[in-house]
Image (cartoon, rainbow, N blue to C red):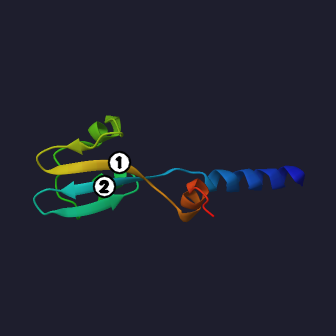
Amino acid sequence: MMSIFLIMCGARFLKTNVMRKIIHIELKKEHSHHYFGSVPAVFEDPDLPYLGVSKSRIEKHDKSKPYENKICIIRFGRLLTSTEVRKNKPRTK
């Protein structure tokens, strides 16, 4: 019974500390912005026009810098939750 409790607590701990990534697509011509949770989701969206870059190129790209071509700018970031913000916020009196 104790091992089940530890497994459940461990799963909950892992779930709350998962880094949520976000992919921001800016289409230059349309001046529109689109947000996704994964690279495959970007390329599976039927409403998004041709981006001029392949999925494998984006997956291999250095995520610390935006990817840019004539059609779009792709930025990579992290989605912060209120818990993460509160945890990292310095306390003031």
Task: Report how far apart the C-alphas of labels 2 and 1 lie in the structure.
Answer: 6 Å
Q: The disc labelled 2 sits on which kind of residue?
A: His
Which residue does the image show at 81% across and 51% down from the upper left?
Answer: 6
* Element on which disc 1 rests: strand
**Residue at mark 1:** 76
**Quadrant position of residue 48:** bottom left
Please give left or right for residue 68 compared with residue 83 in the image: left
* Element on which disc 2 rests: strand
Please give left or right for residue 33 compared with residue 36 in the image: left
Q: The disc labelled 1 sits on which kind of residue?
A: Phe
Circles 2, 1 touching at the beta carbon (< 8 Å): yes
**Residue at mark 2:** 24
- First reached walking from the N terminus: tag 2 or tag 1: 2
Which residue does the image show at 16% across and 53% down from the upper left?
Answer: 50
**Quadrant position of residue 86:** bottom right
Query: Residue 30 placed where, x, y %?
Result: 12, 63
Q: Residue furthest front?
A: 93
Query: Residue 77 placed where, x, y %?
Result: 39, 50
**Quadrant, the C terminus:** bottom right
Whether residue 55 is situated above or below residue 92 in the rendered picture: above
